[in-house]
Image: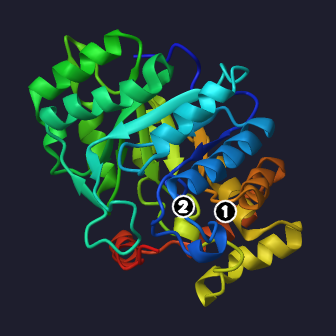
Amino acid sequence: MPLERPIASPISPFGLGLAAVGRPGYINLGRKADLPAERSVDALRAHAHRLLDAAYERGVRYVDAARSYGMAEEFLATWLEGRPDAQDVVIGSKWGYTYTAGWHTDADVHEVKDHSAATYDRQLAETRALLGTRLNLYQIHSVTPDSPALTDPALHERLAALGAEGVTIGLSTSGPAQADAIRAALEITVGGEALFGSVQATYNLMEPSVGPALAMAHATGRRVIVKEAMANGRLADRHAMWPDTTALRKIAREAGASCDALALAAVAARPWADIVLSGAATVEQLTSNLTAADLHLNLDQLEQLAGLAEPAEAYWAQRARLAWA
């Protein structure tokens, strides 16, 4: 089910994800230094708008939100209203998690997962109320192999109906078994047609296990979007201080590049990666991230960087220990 507008822009291979700026709390490292001291709705809306302005000016034409990213959809909607020149921006969002933190960083539960048809109906209406016809891609959020979204025919029919309206149906995945979830999703059809036209997954130098499944998705005509290419900040200059990032820091020095740009460039070098998301929380981070487009890594450098990979189970266990802040 193709997008009415191309999901990948020739202007930039990078997109902007709003997970870090749509709500006061998230698990990325270094948030105290990244966000304004005042994290009111108005303050973060203004902050998000500045980031979106900077992204657009730098050629970014894909923006990724979600119902569970606090006010991300509303921030994006109000930015679009004020930017009539931004008709070429492709908009993706996700459903399947409900934001429950009440605009607090210390909530016991920040989001609740539910992949039922009832949640889809409710959240699609909420997304439509904000983004209207600007919605190009709607994704099931964080699918795992045991998700009922993979086996619910009634939900599949609803999704196919949205696809018939011109919205591409996608899914994002998480967890150490991302590849299994993707392979299962690629098999789903409705009326003889493939249901999913887009796949979004966590892939980075520390967690590359889903790579073969993403290559398969790309080979069968799906758009591939990479999220968390910075490993929630673990690959940024200020946090890449552990011995396991020695190769990253060495090659970055040799290339005169930042660690974050190098990490993103390594992901963008994969021939199946259509869009690599920047999860930047500041204009400065975004600017640094986007210099990845100017880096061209050779095979020897990519082989050295492959040494940063961790076992998938260990990576996801470490991610689960990251604190909301």
Check contact, mark 2 vs mark 1: CB within 8 A: yes
| Quarter of the rendering containing residue 34 | bottom right
Front residue of 268/69: it is 69
The type of residue carrying mark 1 is Ala
For label 1, count other residues whose C-alpha is less than 10 Å away and answer few (under 14), some (14-19) or many (20+). Answer: many
The type of residue carrying mark 2 is Asn
85 versus 203 height, above or below: above
Q: Position of residue 35 (x, y in %)?
A: 62, 66
Residue 204 is labelled as 2
25 versus 63 height, above or below: below
Distance of mark 2 from mark 1, alpha carbons?
Answer: 7 Å
Q: Position of residue 149 (x, y in %)?
A: 18, 38
136 versus 272 height, above or below: above
Q: Is residue 296 visible?
A: no
Q: Position of residue 50 (x, y in %)?
A: 71, 47
Q: Is residue 156 visible?
A: yes
Q: Position of residue 272 (x, y in %)?
A: 55, 39
The residue sitting at the bottom extreme is 243
Q: Residue at x 43, y 36 (%)?
A: 93
Q: Secondary structure at mark 2?
A: loop
Front residue of 323/125: it is 125
Front residue of 158/182: it is 158
Q: Which residue is mark 1?
A: 263
For residue 285, side relative to residue 101 (left or right): right
For residue 66, side relative to residue 89 (left or right): left
Sequence-earlier tag: 2 or 1: 2
Q: Residue at x 12, y 36 (%)?
A: 151
| Quarter of the rendering containing residue 257 | bottom right
For residue 179, side relative to residue 252 (left or right): left
